[in-house]
Amino acid sequence: MTLISREAVRSLTALLVKSICAAVVGAAPLATYATCKSNTSDGLTYYVATIDGFYPSSPLSASSANVGDVIYKETGTPRFKNKGGAWATFSCNPAVYAARQGIGAPDADFIYPTSVAGIGIRISELNNNRYPFTPTTISSTGQWGEKVKITVELIKTGPVKAGGTLEGAFARWTANPNGATLIEFRFTSPVKIESGLPTCNVATTNVSVPMGKVSAVTFRGKGSVSKEIPFKLQLNCAGGDSGASTNVYVTLTDATDRANRSTTLSLNGGSTATGLGVEILSGTTVLGYGADSVAPGNVNQWKAGAVSQGMSTFDIPLAARYVQTATAVTAGSANAQATFTMSYQ
């Protein structure tokens, strides 16, 4: 019997949760009912902008970083996406402070949360003015500066036990701290964050299990079985945040009959024996067969265990045996083949 790996990886998605926090630093309060107009091309009452240069080209990993470390930093200028003319002009009545703030509530280090637990974001302007802050200059009309330098940092704030994607808005300029949005800053493109979970790959992609010679008299009726032959699948693992772990799931697929969802592996076309199949066991449980898929809850997918940070290898002990499937057994060769798909969840 032979098992062949079909390595797979987890795909995760994340939804950005949005809320608004307001704070005032060194500015006298103004009325928050000011009416502001922006010359946009899409009918929005505010401008949408990205930060030039802030678009990591590959997934970011925080598994080797300490809490408080910056895992990505970029300084750029605003690029307005929906200007209705050559300049991003505005008019407000009465005049307003253009308050700067991130999305959500910042901590004592001016770090805002993101949709990926364990990853925060900090935004600052020239002279290290960190959001939230409110400039002392008020304006009623003018154009937004497109050369202002804005720095964005992604910071590890805790264990990153699940990866995800950062997208959508991450900061806003508003008419006074609690007023209408004037500019919404968004990620240029989705930023993928890899989880801080341990990662694994199959150490031996092809596993042969010699079943040996079995006398036909071993089988005394349907359901009777031969002696179990032990074998194992082995994974090489590495990385992960302290205290993190990942669950290892396995799906076996019948290579001869991929529609097989039973607990009996079919003999392949080269076999000459009849009336037999193969069973694969995990402990005392006879395993079933399913589609070659990593989807959680896949038919006959089973949990092999959990890999913790610091584990370099992970063994999955199994056993194989023949099982009688018909009223009579005829002698001959009896070979079977299965594939196994790993899913890390």
Image (tube, grey):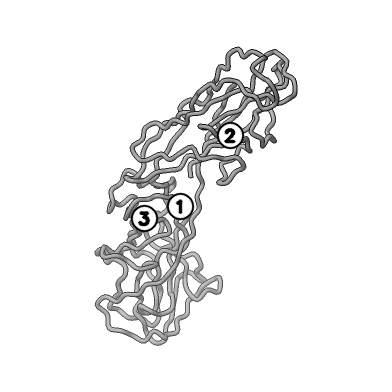
Q: CA distance from mark 2 to mark 1?
A: 32 Å
In percent of width and height, residue 317 lies at: 48, 29
Q: What SS does tag 1 mark?
A: strand
Q: Which kind of residue does numbered mark 2 sit on? A: Leu
Identify the mark nearer the N-term, 2 or 3.
3
Q: What SS does tag 2 mark?
A: loop
* Residue 179 falls in image quadrant: bottom left
Of circles 2 and 3, the one toward us is 2
Decide if residue 52 is on the left or right side of residue 230: left
Q: CA distance from mark 2 to mark 3?
A: 39 Å
Q: Which kind of residue does numbered mark 3 sit on? A: Ile
Where does label 3 land, which residue?
A: 119
Where does label 1 land, which residue?
A: 164
Where does label 2 land, which residue?
A: 287
* Residue 212 falls in image quadrant: top right
Of circles 2 and 1, the one toward us is 2
Question: Dots 2 and 3: beta carbons under 8 Å?
Answer: no
In percent of width and height, residue 13 lies at: 50, 53
The label shown at residue 186 is: none
Which residue occupies the foreground of this view, 320 or 313? Answer: 320
Is residue 13 depicted above or below 267 in this figure? below
For mark 2, does the 10 Å Cα neighbourhood hold few (<14), some (14 to 19), or many (20 or more) residues?
many
Q: What SS does tag 3 mark?
A: strand
Is residue 162 depicted above or below 145 in this figure? above
